[in-house]
Image (cartoon, rainbow, N blue to C red):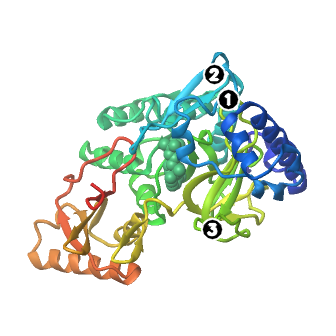
Amino acid sequence: MSVQYWEEEMETLPRVGLESIQLRRLQHLVARVYRTVEPYRRKMEAVGLKPEDIKTLADLAKLPFTVKDDLRDNYPFGLFTVPLEQVVRVHASSGTTGKPTVVGYTAKDIETWSNVMARALVCAGASKGDMIHNAYGYGLFTGGLGAHYGIERLGATAIPVSGGNSKRQINIMRDFGSTVLLSTPSYALNLADAMDAMQVDPKSLSLRVGIFGAEPWSENMREEVERKLNLKATDIYGLSEVMGPGVAQECLLTERGMHIMEDHFLPEIIDPDTGEVLPPGEKGELVFTTLTKEAFPIIRYRTKDISRLYYEPCACGRTLVRMEKVTGRTDDMLIIRGVNVFPSQVEHVLMGIEGVEPHYLIVVEREGNLDTMQVQVEVSEGIFSDEIRVLENLSKQIQKEIKDLLGVTCRVKLVEPRTIQRSEGKAQRVIDKRKI
Ligand code: DLL
Protein backbone atom coordinates (compact mmCIF):
# COMPACT_ATOMS: atom_id res chain seq x y z
CA MET A 1 0.00 0.00 0.00
CA SER A 2 1.55 3.31 -0.99
CA VAL A 3 1.26 6.12 1.55
CA GLN A 4 -0.66 9.18 0.41
CA TYR A 5 -0.19 12.69 1.76
CA TRP A 6 -2.16 15.89 1.37
CA GLU A 7 0.71 18.34 1.87
CA GLU A 8 3.65 16.01 1.46
CA GLU A 9 6.43 18.55 1.86
CA MET A 10 5.17 19.82 5.20
CA GLU A 11 4.10 16.42 6.48
CA THR A 12 7.52 14.86 5.82
CA LEU A 13 9.80 17.84 6.47
CA PRO A 14 12.97 16.94 8.43
CA ARG A 15 12.51 18.12 12.00
CA VAL A 16 15.15 20.85 11.89
CA GLY A 17 13.26 22.52 9.05
CA LEU A 18 9.96 22.05 10.83
CA GLU A 19 11.32 23.53 14.06
CA SER A 20 12.67 26.58 12.31
CA ILE A 21 9.21 27.20 10.78
CA GLN A 22 7.64 26.72 14.21
CA LEU A 23 10.00 29.23 15.82
CA ARG A 24 9.42 31.88 13.16
CA ARG A 25 5.65 31.46 13.46
CA LEU A 26 5.77 31.50 17.25
CA GLN A 27 7.75 34.76 17.35
CA HIS A 28 5.34 36.35 14.94
CA LEU A 29 2.33 35.17 16.95
CA VAL A 30 3.65 36.37 20.31
CA ALA A 31 4.43 39.80 18.89
CA ARG A 32 0.95 40.03 17.42
CA VAL A 33 -1.04 39.00 20.49
CA TYR A 34 1.12 41.25 22.68
CA ARG A 35 0.20 44.13 20.43
CA THR A 36 -3.47 43.35 19.95
CA VAL A 37 -4.89 41.46 22.94
CA GLU A 38 -4.97 43.24 26.26
CA PRO A 39 -5.39 40.11 28.47
CA TYR A 40 -2.35 38.43 26.83
CA ARG A 41 -0.25 41.59 27.18
CA ARG A 42 -1.18 41.91 30.86
CA LYS A 43 -0.24 38.29 31.54
CA MET A 44 3.12 38.70 29.84
CA GLU A 45 3.82 41.94 31.67
CA ALA A 46 3.01 40.23 34.96
CA VAL A 47 5.98 37.87 34.41
CA GLY A 48 8.19 40.56 32.88
CA LEU A 49 8.22 39.04 29.42
CA LYS A 50 8.55 40.89 26.09
CA PRO A 51 7.96 39.35 22.64
CA GLU A 52 11.67 39.69 21.80
CA ASP A 53 12.49 37.36 24.74
CA ILE A 54 11.25 34.43 22.62
CA LYS A 55 14.54 33.48 20.98
CA THR A 56 14.27 29.67 20.78
CA LEU A 57 11.45 27.13 20.87
CA ALA A 58 12.44 26.33 24.47
CA ASP A 59 11.49 29.91 25.40
CA LEU A 60 7.88 28.89 24.84
CA ALA A 61 7.97 27.60 28.42
CA LYS A 62 8.42 31.17 29.67
CA LEU A 63 4.99 32.19 28.40
CA PRO A 64 2.02 32.09 30.76
CA PHE A 65 -0.62 29.40 30.26
CA THR A 66 -4.11 30.04 28.97
CA VAL A 67 -6.98 28.17 30.63
CA LYS A 68 -10.69 27.77 29.96
CA ASP A 69 -11.49 30.45 32.54
CA ASP A 70 -9.54 33.00 30.47
CA LEU A 71 -12.04 32.35 27.67
CA ARG A 72 -14.99 32.65 30.03
CA ASP A 73 -13.64 35.84 31.60
CA ASN A 74 -13.36 37.41 28.15
CA TYR A 75 -16.71 36.08 26.92
CA PRO A 76 -17.69 36.25 24.13
CA PHE A 77 -15.08 37.88 21.86
CA GLY A 78 -12.50 39.41 24.21
CA LEU A 79 -9.61 37.23 23.05
CA PHE A 80 -10.15 37.78 19.33
CA THR A 81 -7.20 39.51 17.69
CA VAL A 82 -9.02 40.91 14.64
CA PRO A 83 -12.06 43.16 14.30
CA LEU A 84 -15.34 41.25 14.07
CA GLU A 85 -15.77 42.30 10.42
CA GLN A 86 -12.95 39.89 9.61
CA VAL A 87 -14.51 36.99 11.49
CA VAL A 88 -16.44 34.78 9.10
CA ARG A 89 -17.52 32.10 11.55
CA VAL A 90 -17.87 31.40 15.26
CA HIS A 91 -18.25 28.12 17.13
CA ALA A 92 -19.01 27.60 20.80
CA SER A 93 -18.93 24.87 23.37
CA SER A 94 -22.14 23.95 25.11
CA GLY A 95 -20.70 25.09 28.44
CA THR A 96 -21.63 22.34 30.85
CA THR A 97 -20.38 24.57 33.64
CA GLY A 98 -20.70 28.33 33.44
CA LYS A 99 -20.63 30.37 30.26
CA PRO A 100 -19.94 28.75 26.92
CA THR A 101 -16.54 29.28 25.34
CA VAL A 102 -16.63 31.04 21.99
CA VAL A 103 -14.05 30.77 19.21
CA GLY A 104 -13.80 32.65 15.91
CA TYR A 105 -12.24 32.17 12.48
CA THR A 106 -11.19 34.47 9.65
CA ALA A 107 -11.54 33.33 6.03
CA LYS A 108 -7.87 32.34 6.15
CA ASP A 109 -8.44 30.34 9.36
CA ILE A 110 -11.20 28.38 7.62
CA GLU A 111 -8.77 27.79 4.77
CA THR A 112 -6.11 26.50 7.18
CA TRP A 113 -8.62 24.33 9.01
CA SER A 114 -9.95 22.82 5.77
CA ASN A 115 -6.41 21.95 4.81
CA VAL A 116 -5.45 20.32 8.10
CA MET A 117 -8.74 18.42 8.05
CA ALA A 118 -8.06 17.27 4.47
CA ARG A 119 -4.63 16.15 5.68
CA ALA A 120 -6.31 14.18 8.47
CA LEU A 121 -8.69 12.49 6.03
CA VAL A 122 -5.84 11.47 3.71
CA CYS A 123 -3.79 10.35 6.71
CA ALA A 124 -6.68 7.96 7.55
CA GLY A 125 -6.65 6.58 4.01
CA ALA A 126 -9.50 8.62 2.47
CA SER A 127 -9.19 10.06 -1.01
CA LYS A 128 -10.99 12.12 -3.62
CA GLY A 129 -13.15 9.24 -4.77
CA ASP A 130 -14.68 8.61 -1.34
CA MET A 131 -18.30 9.09 -0.23
CA ILE A 132 -17.79 10.54 3.21
CA HIS A 133 -20.63 10.09 5.67
CA ASN A 134 -20.25 12.89 8.19
CA ALA A 135 -22.27 12.08 11.30
CA TYR A 136 -20.57 14.67 13.53
CA GLY A 137 -23.11 17.21 14.71
CA TYR A 138 -23.46 20.33 12.56
CA GLY A 139 -23.94 23.56 14.46
CA LEU A 140 -21.99 25.37 17.13
CA PHE A 141 -19.99 22.16 17.76
CA THR A 142 -16.89 22.18 15.55
CA GLY A 143 -17.22 18.52 14.51
CA GLY A 144 -19.76 18.73 11.68
CA LEU A 145 -18.69 21.85 9.78
CA GLY A 146 -14.99 21.39 10.54
CA ALA A 147 -14.94 17.93 8.97
CA HIS A 148 -17.26 19.03 6.18
CA TYR A 149 -14.93 21.72 4.87
CA GLY A 150 -12.05 19.25 4.91
CA ILE A 151 -14.04 16.73 2.89
CA GLU A 152 -14.87 19.34 0.26
CA ARG A 153 -11.28 20.56 0.21
CA LEU A 154 -10.13 17.02 -0.42
CA GLY A 155 -12.56 16.83 -3.31
CA ALA A 156 -14.41 13.80 -1.93
CA THR A 157 -18.21 13.76 -1.69
CA ALA A 158 -19.57 15.02 1.63
CA ILE A 159 -22.76 13.49 2.98
CA PRO A 160 -23.67 16.08 5.66
CA VAL A 161 -25.98 13.78 7.57
CA SER A 162 -25.10 15.14 11.08
CA GLY A 163 -26.06 13.14 14.21
CA GLY A 164 -29.29 11.34 14.99
CA ASN A 165 -31.94 9.28 13.21
CA SER A 166 -29.83 6.15 12.93
CA LYS A 167 -32.30 4.33 10.71
CA ARG A 168 -32.10 7.04 8.09
CA GLN A 169 -28.30 7.07 8.40
CA ILE A 170 -28.14 3.39 7.61
CA ASN A 171 -30.48 3.71 4.64
CA ILE A 172 -28.25 6.51 3.34
CA MET A 173 -25.10 4.45 3.87
CA ARG A 174 -26.63 1.60 1.92
CA ASP A 175 -28.20 3.66 -0.88
CA PHE A 176 -25.39 6.21 -1.38
CA GLY A 177 -22.56 3.74 -0.82
CA SER A 178 -20.81 5.59 2.03
CA THR A 179 -17.17 4.49 2.17
CA VAL A 180 -15.88 6.55 5.11
CA LEU A 181 -17.74 7.15 8.36
CA LEU A 182 -17.07 10.16 10.58
CA SER A 183 -18.71 10.11 14.02
CA THR A 184 -18.04 9.83 17.71
CA PRO A 185 -17.02 6.25 18.58
CA SER A 186 -20.08 5.91 20.82
CA TYR A 187 -22.38 6.93 17.99
CA ALA A 188 -20.62 4.43 15.71
CA LEU A 189 -21.64 1.69 18.13
CA ASN A 190 -25.12 3.12 18.19
CA LEU A 191 -25.23 2.80 14.41
CA ALA A 192 -24.00 -0.79 14.70
CA ASP A 193 -26.92 -1.58 17.03
CA ALA A 194 -29.35 0.04 14.63
CA MET A 195 -27.93 -2.00 11.74
CA ASP A 196 -28.43 -5.10 13.76
CA ALA A 197 -32.05 -4.17 14.50
CA MET A 198 -32.66 -3.45 10.82
CA GLN A 199 -30.95 -6.73 9.90
CA VAL A 200 -28.48 -4.90 7.69
CA ASP A 201 -25.25 -6.83 7.42
CA PRO A 202 -22.30 -4.36 7.62
CA LYS A 203 -20.51 -6.56 5.08
CA SER A 204 -23.18 -5.61 2.56
CA LEU A 205 -22.21 -1.93 2.93
CA SER A 206 -19.21 -0.15 1.38
CA LEU A 207 -17.73 1.27 4.60
CA ARG A 208 -13.95 1.01 4.62
CA VAL A 209 -12.63 3.45 7.22
CA GLY A 210 -14.01 5.14 10.32
CA ILE A 211 -12.61 8.42 11.64
CA PHE A 212 -13.74 8.55 15.23
CA GLY A 213 -13.03 11.16 17.87
CA ALA A 214 -14.36 13.96 20.08
CA GLU A 215 -14.39 11.66 23.13
CA PRO A 216 -12.02 9.12 24.68
CA TRP A 217 -12.28 5.52 23.53
CA SER A 218 -10.24 2.47 24.39
CA GLU A 219 -8.36 -0.04 22.24
CA ASN A 220 -10.98 -2.62 23.13
CA MET A 221 -13.67 -0.30 21.88
CA ARG A 222 -11.73 0.03 18.64
CA GLU A 223 -11.84 -3.73 18.16
CA GLU A 224 -15.54 -3.74 18.90
CA VAL A 225 -16.30 -0.97 16.38
CA GLU A 226 -14.11 -2.59 13.72
CA ARG A 227 -15.82 -5.91 14.16
CA LYS A 228 -19.36 -4.57 14.31
CA LEU A 229 -19.04 -2.14 11.41
CA ASN A 230 -16.56 -4.09 9.29
CA LEU A 231 -14.16 -1.17 8.82
CA LYS A 232 -10.76 0.10 9.94
CA ALA A 233 -11.28 2.46 12.89
CA THR A 234 -8.90 5.42 13.25
CA ASP A 235 -8.68 8.08 15.92
CA ILE A 236 -8.98 11.82 15.29
CA TYR A 237 -8.32 14.46 17.91
CA GLY A 238 -9.14 18.11 18.17
CA LEU A 239 -10.63 20.78 20.37
CA SER A 240 -12.49 23.95 19.57
CA GLU A 241 -10.15 26.25 21.51
CA VAL A 242 -7.29 25.15 19.25
CA MET A 243 -9.23 24.70 15.98
CA GLY A 244 -11.69 21.79 16.02
CA PRO A 245 -11.29 18.32 14.48
CA GLY A 246 -8.02 17.76 12.61
CA VAL A 247 -5.47 18.82 15.21
CA ALA A 248 -4.15 15.24 15.16
CA GLN A 249 -4.97 12.06 13.25
CA GLU A 250 -3.82 8.47 13.33
CA CYS A 251 -2.26 7.16 10.13
CA LEU A 252 -2.83 3.67 8.82
CA LEU A 253 0.68 2.49 9.65
CA THR A 254 1.26 3.84 13.11
CA GLU A 255 1.43 1.50 16.01
CA ARG A 256 0.82 4.24 18.47
CA GLY A 257 -0.48 7.72 18.38
CA MET A 258 -1.94 10.41 16.16
CA HIS A 259 0.18 12.75 14.06
CA ILE A 260 -0.16 16.33 15.28
CA MET A 261 -0.36 18.94 12.53
CA GLU A 262 2.65 20.51 14.18
CA ASP A 263 3.34 23.28 11.72
CA HIS A 264 0.03 24.77 12.93
CA PHE A 265 -0.34 23.46 16.49
CA LEU A 266 2.70 23.34 18.74
CA PRO A 267 2.32 20.73 21.51
CA GLU A 268 3.89 20.42 24.95
CA ILE A 269 3.33 17.96 27.78
CA ILE A 270 3.35 19.39 31.26
CA ASP A 271 3.06 18.11 34.77
CA PRO A 272 -0.54 19.12 35.60
CA ASP A 273 0.37 19.88 39.21
CA THR A 274 3.52 21.95 38.77
CA GLY A 275 3.09 23.24 35.19
CA GLU A 276 6.62 22.09 34.41
CA VAL A 277 7.36 20.90 30.85
CA LEU A 278 8.02 17.15 30.77
CA PRO A 279 10.57 15.41 28.53
CA PRO A 280 9.44 13.56 25.36
CA GLY A 281 7.68 10.28 26.09
CA GLU A 282 6.43 11.25 29.54
CA LYS A 283 2.77 11.26 30.35
CA GLY A 284 1.09 14.49 31.39
CA GLU A 285 -1.29 17.26 30.37
CA LEU A 286 -1.31 18.26 26.73
CA VAL A 287 -0.80 21.98 26.04
CA PHE A 288 -1.18 23.65 22.64
CA THR A 289 -0.06 26.91 21.06
CA THR A 290 -1.60 27.74 17.69
CA LEU A 291 1.00 28.97 15.21
CA THR A 292 -1.05 30.19 12.27
CA LYS A 293 -4.51 31.14 13.50
CA GLU A 294 -5.60 34.72 12.92
CA ALA A 295 -8.91 35.46 14.67
CA PHE A 296 -8.46 33.39 17.79
CA PRO A 297 -4.88 32.31 18.34
CA ILE A 298 -4.16 30.73 21.68
CA ILE A 299 -0.94 30.51 23.67
CA ARG A 300 -0.11 27.49 25.81
CA TYR A 301 -3.70 26.33 26.19
CA ARG A 302 -4.06 23.73 28.91
CA THR A 303 -6.31 21.06 27.40
CA LYS A 304 -6.61 18.93 30.56
CA ASP A 305 -6.22 15.94 28.23
CA ILE A 306 -3.71 13.34 29.33
CA SER A 307 -1.33 12.09 26.68
CA ARG A 308 2.34 11.81 25.75
CA LEU A 309 4.41 12.67 22.70
CA TYR A 310 6.43 10.28 20.54
CA TYR A 311 9.10 11.85 18.36
CA GLU A 312 10.39 8.56 16.88
CA PRO A 313 10.00 8.29 13.08
CA CYS A 314 6.77 6.71 11.86
CA ALA A 315 6.52 4.05 9.17
CA CYS A 316 4.28 6.31 7.11
CA GLY A 317 7.11 8.80 6.56
CA ARG A 318 5.43 11.68 8.35
CA THR A 319 7.86 13.53 10.59
CA LEU A 320 5.02 15.11 12.57
CA VAL A 321 5.15 14.11 16.24
CA ARG A 322 2.56 11.62 17.46
CA MET A 323 0.37 11.98 20.54
CA GLU A 324 -0.79 8.94 22.43
CA LYS A 325 -4.49 8.16 22.45
CA VAL A 326 -6.06 10.37 25.08
CA THR A 327 -6.72 8.15 28.07
CA GLY A 328 -8.49 10.69 30.22
CA ARG A 329 -8.64 14.27 31.34
CA THR A 330 -7.20 15.84 34.42
CA ASP A 331 -10.72 16.92 35.18
CA ASP A 332 -12.86 13.84 34.47
CA MET A 333 -10.73 11.88 36.81
CA LEU A 334 -12.89 10.56 39.59
CA ILE A 335 -11.44 10.14 43.03
CA ILE A 336 -13.20 7.32 44.76
CA ARG A 337 -12.13 6.58 48.29
CA GLY A 338 -8.78 8.15 47.50
CA VAL A 339 -8.26 6.22 44.29
CA ASN A 340 -7.99 7.95 40.93
CA VAL A 341 -10.39 6.43 38.46
CA PHE A 342 -10.67 7.26 34.79
CA PRO A 343 -13.92 6.25 33.09
CA SER A 344 -11.82 5.02 30.16
CA GLN A 345 -10.22 2.45 32.45
CA VAL A 346 -13.61 1.13 33.51
CA GLU A 347 -14.53 0.95 29.84
CA HIS A 348 -11.36 -0.93 29.10
CA VAL A 349 -12.32 -3.59 31.63
CA LEU A 350 -15.90 -3.84 30.40
CA MET A 351 -14.92 -4.16 26.75
CA GLY A 352 -12.68 -7.07 27.59
CA ILE A 353 -15.52 -9.10 29.13
CA GLU A 354 -17.62 -11.48 27.12
CA GLY A 355 -21.39 -11.00 27.33
CA VAL A 356 -21.18 -7.27 28.01
CA GLU A 357 -22.20 -4.54 25.58
CA PRO A 358 -20.24 -1.30 25.10
CA HIS A 359 -22.92 0.82 26.74
CA TYR A 360 -22.34 1.73 30.34
CA LEU A 361 -22.82 4.39 32.97
CA ILE A 362 -20.78 5.08 36.07
CA VAL A 363 -22.76 6.47 38.98
CA VAL A 364 -20.80 7.91 41.90
CA GLU A 365 -22.55 8.72 45.17
CA ARG A 366 -21.67 9.51 48.73
CA GLU A 367 -23.22 7.32 51.38
CA GLY A 368 -22.41 8.69 54.81
CA ASN A 369 -18.71 9.53 54.48
CA LEU A 370 -18.07 6.88 51.93
CA ASP A 371 -17.99 7.28 48.16
CA THR A 372 -19.57 4.48 46.20
CA MET A 373 -19.23 3.66 42.55
CA GLN A 374 -21.88 1.78 40.68
CA VAL A 375 -21.23 0.53 37.17
CA GLN A 376 -24.36 -0.01 35.12
CA VAL A 377 -23.73 -1.98 31.99
CA GLU A 378 -25.87 -3.56 29.31
CA VAL A 379 -25.54 -7.28 28.81
CA SER A 380 -25.82 -9.02 25.48
CA GLU A 381 -29.16 -10.19 24.16
CA GLY A 382 -29.94 -13.67 25.45
CA ILE A 383 -27.96 -13.44 28.67
CA PHE A 384 -30.93 -11.98 30.51
CA SER A 385 -33.00 -15.00 29.73
CA ASP A 386 -30.23 -17.28 31.00
CA GLU A 387 -30.09 -18.57 34.55
CA ILE A 388 -29.65 -16.13 37.37
CA ARG A 389 -26.32 -17.80 38.18
CA VAL A 390 -24.88 -16.68 34.84
CA LEU A 391 -25.75 -13.07 35.65
CA GLU A 392 -24.34 -13.32 39.15
CA ASN A 393 -21.08 -14.70 37.85
CA LEU A 394 -20.86 -11.97 35.26
CA SER A 395 -21.39 -9.28 37.90
CA LYS A 396 -18.73 -10.83 40.10
CA GLN A 397 -16.28 -11.04 37.24
CA ILE A 398 -16.76 -7.35 36.37
CA GLN A 399 -16.41 -6.35 40.00
CA LYS A 400 -13.24 -8.36 40.38
CA GLU A 401 -11.59 -7.10 37.21
CA ILE A 402 -12.34 -3.49 38.11
CA LYS A 403 -10.98 -4.08 41.58
CA ASP A 404 -7.85 -5.71 40.15
CA LEU A 405 -7.16 -2.87 37.73
CA LEU A 406 -8.22 0.14 39.72
CA GLY A 407 -8.17 -0.99 43.31
CA VAL A 408 -11.76 0.12 43.82
CA THR A 409 -14.67 -2.05 44.82
CA CYS A 410 -17.75 -1.13 42.84
CA ARG A 411 -21.31 -2.32 42.62
CA VAL A 412 -22.33 -3.73 39.30
CA LYS A 413 -25.81 -3.45 37.90
CA LEU A 414 -26.47 -5.45 34.78
CA VAL A 415 -29.22 -3.96 32.69
CA GLU A 416 -31.12 -5.14 29.65
CA PRO A 417 -29.93 -4.32 26.14
CA ARG A 418 -30.83 -0.80 24.94
CA THR A 419 -31.82 0.59 28.35
CA ILE A 420 -28.90 3.00 28.83
CA GLN A 421 -29.62 6.25 27.09
CA ARG A 422 -27.93 6.52 23.69
CA SER A 423 -26.05 9.57 22.57
CA GLU A 424 -26.15 11.32 19.25
CA GLY A 425 -22.93 13.12 20.07
CA LYS A 426 -20.73 12.60 23.05
CA ALA A 427 -21.86 9.89 25.39
CA GLN A 428 -22.47 10.73 29.03
CA ARG A 429 -20.54 8.08 30.88
CA VAL A 430 -20.52 9.43 34.42
CA ILE A 431 -23.11 10.73 36.82
CA ASP A 432 -21.30 12.14 39.80
CA LYS A 433 -24.01 12.78 42.36
CA ARG A 434 -21.46 14.10 44.85
CA LYS A 435 -21.18 17.29 42.80
CA ILE A 436 -24.88 17.94 42.36
O1 DLL B 1 -14.56 17.48 20.18
C1 DLL B 1 -13.52 18.50 18.25
C2 DLL B 1 -13.59 17.22 17.51
C3 DLL B 1 -14.69 16.96 16.71
C4 DLL B 1 -12.55 16.29 17.57
C5 DLL B 1 -14.77 15.79 15.98
C6 DLL B 1 -12.62 15.12 16.85
C7 DLL B 1 -13.71 14.87 16.05
P1 DLL B 1 -14.54 20.04 21.72
O2 DLL B 1 -16.01 19.88 21.72
O3 DLL B 1 -13.96 21.38 22.00
O4 DLL B 1 -13.95 19.66 20.31
O5 DLL B 1 -13.96 18.98 22.73
C8 DLL B 1 -12.58 18.84 22.89
O6 DLL B 1 -12.86 16.48 23.43
O7 DLL B 1 -10.18 18.34 24.86
C9 DLL B 1 -10.82 16.02 24.48
O8 DLL B 1 -11.06 15.96 25.87
C10 DLL B 1 -12.00 15.41 23.75
N1 DLL B 1 -11.52 14.75 22.53
C11 DLL B 1 -11.54 15.21 21.27
N2 DLL B 1 -11.05 14.27 20.43
C12 DLL B 1 -10.69 13.20 21.18
C13 DLL B 1 -10.13 11.92 20.93
C14 DLL B 1 -14.06 18.45 19.67
N3 DLL B 1 -9.83 11.50 19.72
C15 DLL B 1 -12.29 17.72 23.87
N4 DLL B 1 -9.89 11.12 21.99
C16 DLL B 1 -10.81 17.45 23.98
C17 DLL B 1 -10.18 11.51 23.25
C18 DLL B 1 -10.99 13.52 22.53
N5 DLL B 1 -10.74 12.68 23.54
Question: Image point 25% across, 63% down: which residue?
Answer: 377
Residue marked by disc 3: 274
Q: Residues within 10 Å of mark 3 (few under 14, many from 20)?
A: few
Q: Nearer the viewer, residue 417 or 20?
A: 20
Residue marked by disc 2: 87
Q: Quadrant of residue 408?
A: bottom left
Q: Nearer the viewer, residue 255 or 39?
A: 39
Whether residue 232 is visible, yes or no, is no
Proximity of marks 1 and 2: CB atoms separated by less than 8 Å? yes
Question: Image point 89% across, 45% down: which residue?
Answer: 52
Q: Nearer the viewer, residue 179 or 337?
A: 337
Instruction: Give the x, y percent position of residue 5.
Output: 74, 44
- Horizontal placement of 130 versus 93: left or right? right
Q: Secondary structure at mark 2?
A: loop
Instruction: Give the x, y percent position of residue 266.
Output: 73, 50
Q: Secondary structure at mark 1?
A: loop
Whether disc 2's CB lies below 8 Å from ligand 1 is answered no
Q: Nearer the viewer, residue 316 or 280?
A: 280
User: Any mark on residue 295, and which?
Assistant: 1
Whether residue 200 is visible, yes or no, is yes
The C terminus lies in which quarter of the figure?
bottom left
User: Any mark on residue 161, and which?
Assistant: none
Question: Image point 39% across, 45% down: which residue?
Answer: 97
- Horizontal placement of 176 versus 267: left or right? left
Instruction: Give the x, y percent position of residue 108.
Output: 72, 26
Indicate which disc, 3 or 2, sits on the residue closer to the N terminus: 2
